[in-house]
Amino acid sequence: MLMLEARSDQRWQVIFREGDRWQVGIYTPENTSLNEIVVLERHDRPELFLLVSGEIVLVLSKDGSQLEEVRMLPGKIYIVDEWHNAYRPLGKSGIALVIEAPDITTEYLEVSPRCRE
């Protein structure tokens, strides 16, 4: 058995990987508000997000033209396959556990300021 701390002082840190099958990481969003988000990312396979502690708001978009804010709730699992980013409201603490494939391909999309209005 391996027991790991769900903590990191980085934005993203892989804490366990099983070869090319799956990996788990700790994610602490660097953004503290919707207005700070200037880029969305999308992967070629879904990711699983689980709030470990604190507060995190997922920012989701089907096509990059409209943003949806989803406040993560403890004990709920979020499967994300659309454009996304996240923030910690007012810079509060917030840690999520993320499970994904280790060999995902990532695309990036610049967010228009109009999307955040």
Image (tube, helix red, strand yellow):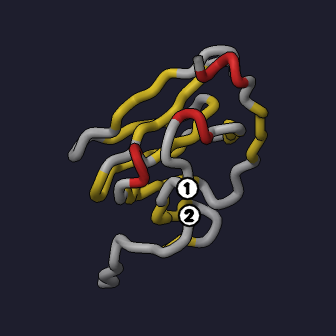
The residue under label 2 is which amino acid type? Answer: Arg
In this view, 29 is above or below 63? below
Q: Which of the two discs, 1 and 2, sits closer to the camera?
A: 1
The x, y position of residue 97, in whole percent, is 40, 58
Q: Which residue position is annotated with label 2? A: 11
Q: Residue at x 46, y 37 (%)?
A: 58
The x, y position of residue 96, in whole percent, is 40, 55
Q: Residue at x 77, y 39 (%)?
A: 108
In this view, 10 is above or below 113? below
Question: Camera-side residue: 66 or 16?
Answer: 66
Left or right: where does residue 41 sit relative to residue 29?
A: right
Q: Image quadrant for the C terminus?
A: top right
Question: Camera-side residue: 114 or 8?
Answer: 114
Q: Residue at x 72, y 29 (%)?
A: 111
Left or right: where does residue 49 sit relative to residue 20?
A: left
Say few, some or many: other residues with alpha carbon within 10 Å of mark 1 (under 14 / 14 to 19 / 20 or more): some
In this view, 79 is above or below 25? above
Q: Which residue position is annotated with label 1? A: 30
Give the SS element for disc 2: loop
The residue under label 1 is which amino acid type? Answer: Glu
Distance from label 1 to label 2 (Cα)?
Answer: 6 Å
The x, y position of residue 115, in whole percent, is 65, 19
Say few, some or many: other residues with alpha carbon within 10 Å of mark 2 (under 14 / 14 to 19 / 20 or more): few
Give the SS element for disc 1: loop
